[in-house]
Amino acid sequence: MQSQDRLTALPPLVAPSPELAARLQALWETAPGLRGFFMSVDHKEIGIRYIVTAFAFLILGGCEALLMRLQLAGPNMRLLTPEQYDELFTMHGISMIFLYAMPVLSGFSNYLWPLLFGARDMAFPRVNALSYWTFLFAGLFIYAAFIMGVAPNAGWFNYVPYTGKAANPGINIDFYALGMIFLGISTTVGSINFVVTLMRTRAPGMSINRMPVMVWGTLTASLANILVVPSVSLAFLMLWLDRNFGTHFFTVGDGGQPVLWQHLFWMFGHPWVYAIVLPAMGFVSDGLPIFCRRPLVGYTLVALSTVATMALGFGVWVHHMFATGISDVALSFFSGASLVITVPSAIAVFCWIATIWAGRPIATAAFHFYAGMIALFVIGGVSGFMTASVPVDWQLTDTYFVVAHIHYVLIGINVFPVIGAFYTWFPKMSGRMLDERLGKWNFWLMFIGFNLGFFPMHISGLLGMPRRIYTYSPDMGWSTLNLITTLGSFLFAIGVLLFIVNVVVSLRRGAVAGPNPWDAGTLEWATSSPPPPYNFTVIPEVGSRHPLWEDRLGDAGASSVARGFAFDEGRETLGTSMLDSEPDSVLRMPGDSWLPFLLGLATTFVFIGMLIHVWWLAGMALIACAVVLIFWLQPDSLPPLIPIEEASHV
Amino acid sequence: MNGFPLNYVTSEGTKAAAILPLTKGVTAISLAVILIVAALILAAIFRRRAVGGPHDLVQGTTPLHWIYIGTGVTVAILLGVLVWTMATVAAVVQPKDEPALSLDITGHQWWWEVRYLDQDHPSNIFNTANEIHIPVGKPIRINLHAADVIHSFWVPALSGKTDMIPGQVNTIWLQADRPGAYRGQCTEYCGKQHAHMGFTVIADEDQKFEAWRVAQVQGKTPQEDDPSAIADGRQAFKTHCGACHTVRGTAAGGIVGPDLTHVMSRSTIAAGTLPNAPGWFAGWIADPQHIKPGAKMPVLDISGPELHAVTTYLATLN
Amino acid sequence: MSDAVALKMAESDPAAIAARRKQAILGRVSGWYGVWFIIMTEGSLFAYLLFSYYYCLAQAGVKWPVSGPPPLTLAAMSTLLLVASSAALAWSQWSLVKEAKPRLVPGVGLAVIFGSLFLMLQALDLAKKAPAISASTYDSFYVLLAGLDFLHVAAGIIALVALCAWAIDGRIIGIRTTYVSIIAAYWHFVVAVWLSIFATMFLLPYAS
């Protein structure tokens, strides 16, 4: 043990025993059945729900895309009416960007963080449940509009004045506006939970330079969300007031400014794009070393480039607005910032390639997805670099070139790493391996289908095809390219379908995984698959980035995984300091609770009341929220935290 | 690239020509980067290396200097592109000569109102729609307006996009280097018929342009000796179409839709959607909602003979 | 021994003051960390709102409100009340750290009284201004700024009332005195937000 002095105040390290495990099981187990379903605060349960729900939205968004691709397969098709097409492309964007891309990463982070940290749960387990329920209810709220035939129809970017009452009188946009404010609550409380979890619950010794890279990704994404989600919530609140109370925030003529919407939307929107790729880049940074049989090359560079990307990401929003007639000075500044932001991404790419180069890659399905992601990332990156150059962007913007760019970014840097993460961590979640042979078919179908479908979009863009058109004339010369794109997108969809088949089949018949099927080096692989409700029988002490690889990296004995802290006098986990992760207290954790579900439900009725102007309903629901919160926050709902020097555990 | 009327990999105008080398340059850099990185990935995967057992880990330090070199090269290229970008912006922001002509163009759902300005001779000011004639070889100033929602003005062969935003006027310039017809298109999503919001810029030699302009200024005052079919058509037009459309010199003075005073001089109708030919025109009037679902032009309660009269009358508006 | 009994005993211990002081400094409860991020996100919300106001003001090219600067008296009184409530709460926090006998209930109680008076004045003002919400962009911003601030102050007062009730009940003892820091952090933040709104909507129009 390298720093014996520090540990004198701590309880002794113990080895796990069946008695201890039984005691912890009794303490941490979620109630069985439907009761447990509504009351569970277990981060693993919540993480899996997040992932499954996000995937359901991915499938819905994918079906919407396929319908659009059928409509665009040939010129002057009449499969969809313009209104149907508009609603489909809007719902497609909302589903993928808001209801799939961020939540699926939150799901993985929720599931993995406490395991990566050697902790028993997140810092705020009930807030975790609340963030899931509000995500689910907000998603259903927006999809209710779709089912009722009044889906939002103005694109996910929702520019005014087209979304104002005058041009768009239906209830469609009100659903979207309130749904986004609602979803913002979920994102915000979830993000705060991640940041505090990182500050408080890392295993002793896991200083910030020993955290897995995906933790850096989710940390920066969460901090960004805390800072930028209010921007879009405010924009949607102002739009809702414009539409329902005749205010003049965006309406022309009384001092309102349509361009203000674009500023508020993109001040949020651009950092959001980074927030939905940085954690996924973290999957690659943590996944590649497993399958290259070596630590990541340039850990510090990758961690810092993650932070740098996010920091620069706050200063590039105007590159979505190069054509709005802004001043030359602003153009130069934002063009420069948008070019510079490629540097940290380039560093990450170099580090990944160097990891493969200097490692000994094993061609698992997961490795295929990670390596494929690097290639797609570069294609999406350079097309972003092209649009960062202002005069070029004046030609490229709002054509299919940008459609290609956004899909290379979001599918390349989100979907591919996420599927790779499935192949890597599914065995941890389910205890069973995904089928590798199906996995490779899965990869090649998705990879070929994706490039066949989306690469030609660059060319249709260069040939002038505008975005968001429901049909086109045969005289424009885009017919063949669009047919190829449609074929490719169906091939891609078959690849995704194969993945789902693999998951369903492997859940029942997959090979049993065991605790560490990949012989990986980080803490989540130290516990059984799937982990018990309490994650770790004893909370380990960490002395390096790869506690399970130390014997083979010449660092043997730096960490203590086999023996650790028991903390079994209640639902407890260890509280540690922010930078160096020195233990300072025993955190007492809540058990099963109805409160998160009830608060989520009450919030839903607040928004339903606002939507249909039934103010007494909204008011009653708001009071219900306050009552639930007072119950939640009352002082003795939880036993108090214990400073570590007063802890008395044997 | 004649088969691709909206492409921007070729240029026919001064401004587009100034941007094109930069577009091609960054495209070339991008393709090179893709190829190099793809080669590196493949080499990293397939390079020959010492075999190891499944449990072995690769140890030893890593050559980080390759990463620093790669980053340095990236930064150098980016700085070069940044300088090139600034120089290009500076080159296209203003025309070299004073513009020869000023236009107000207003985006409507889903058509383009074009107003030819003349500070010295107010009587020369006139309106047209969806087809913009300009003299070749001279810079033209265009003030962009929007009547309802945001649109974006784009003629890829001549110039990049600029948004048309309600409550704001964006002024741009463009210049055609060769006579020809250049396709334009709205590129900011503006509602149901965003797809069918095209227009054409026609660049003519001075003389031809001047002749066109002089003709456009004229109204279509009814004549005593008009055949009765035309007079009937004019009457039917006034009844059914006059609330929205103007034919200067007649009682039809609506301003909701395009000015039709010289509609027969245009090559397309319905904002670049249909060729301007008698059959298409009659079909459009009979059922615009079939051709452009959601368009602001309603399906008229118009009888067969009246439709015939209107099209007969419209055919004289050239 | 139940937690509550243990805490009572800890409170009567001579070392209780030292322990409280340490708690106030360290703030180890996770909620203490959480509230700072709530403040960060809520602070961003008001920052974006003020940005929007200044953006529209700059684009409008005229002084807002066009009818001349608004009357100051009532708003200044409101501001003094809110600052007084913040001071009362700060006194209560100070006593927790420095005094042998903490004045929790009187301090929080005073903060509630001052805060409620502020809320009443704001409610009267809003009732007058809200019907004009659609009169102009300035009016829309005025009502939105004042309305959002009203909601935040109301939430703060609910929290302070709950804190006061818990303190009277003897539940805010030992480690749980960090509850005071958590709720006070939010309350001081809400006061700061009002000061920035006061400066923007009431003082700035007087500047030439």
Image (cartoon, grey):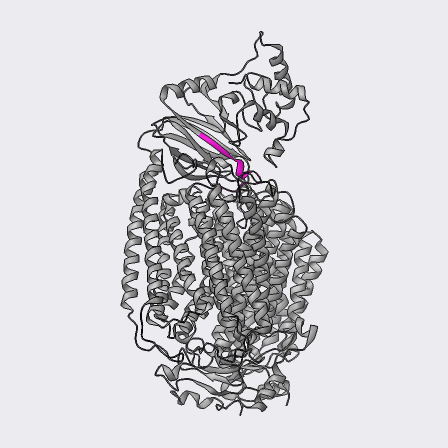
Left or right of A351, for residue A415? right
Q: What stretch is highlighted in magenta?
A: B186-200
Q: In which quarter of the image is residue A340?
A: bottom left
x%, y% of residue A605?
A: 68, 59
Residue A91 in the image: state x and y as whole percent. 58, 52
Please determine whether, in this image, residue B270 is positioned above or below residue A173: above
Of A419 and A301, which appears nearest the observer? A419
Q: Give residue B66's position: percent from left, percent from top.
A: 28, 65
**Magenta-drawn stretch, dominant element (helix, strand or loop):** loop
Is residue A511 depicted above or below A228 in this figure? below
Vertical position of residue A635 compared to residue A499: above or below: below
Q: Nearer the viewer, residue C85 or B178?
A: B178
Asked if the magenta segment contains residue A220, the reply would be no
**Residue at image x 61%, y 40%?**
A166
C46 lies above or below B47: above
Q: In which quarter of the image is the N terminus of chain B?
A: top left
Viewer-proximal residue, A222 or B284? B284
Q: Is residue C19 visible?
A: yes
Residue A582 vs residue A170, the one in the foreground: A170
Residue B289: horizontal and vertical position, in percent? Answer: 62, 33
Q: What residue do we see at 40% from left, 42% from top? A: A395
> Residue sitting at 28 percent across and 70 percent down?
B63
Q: Does the magenta portion include B190?
A: yes
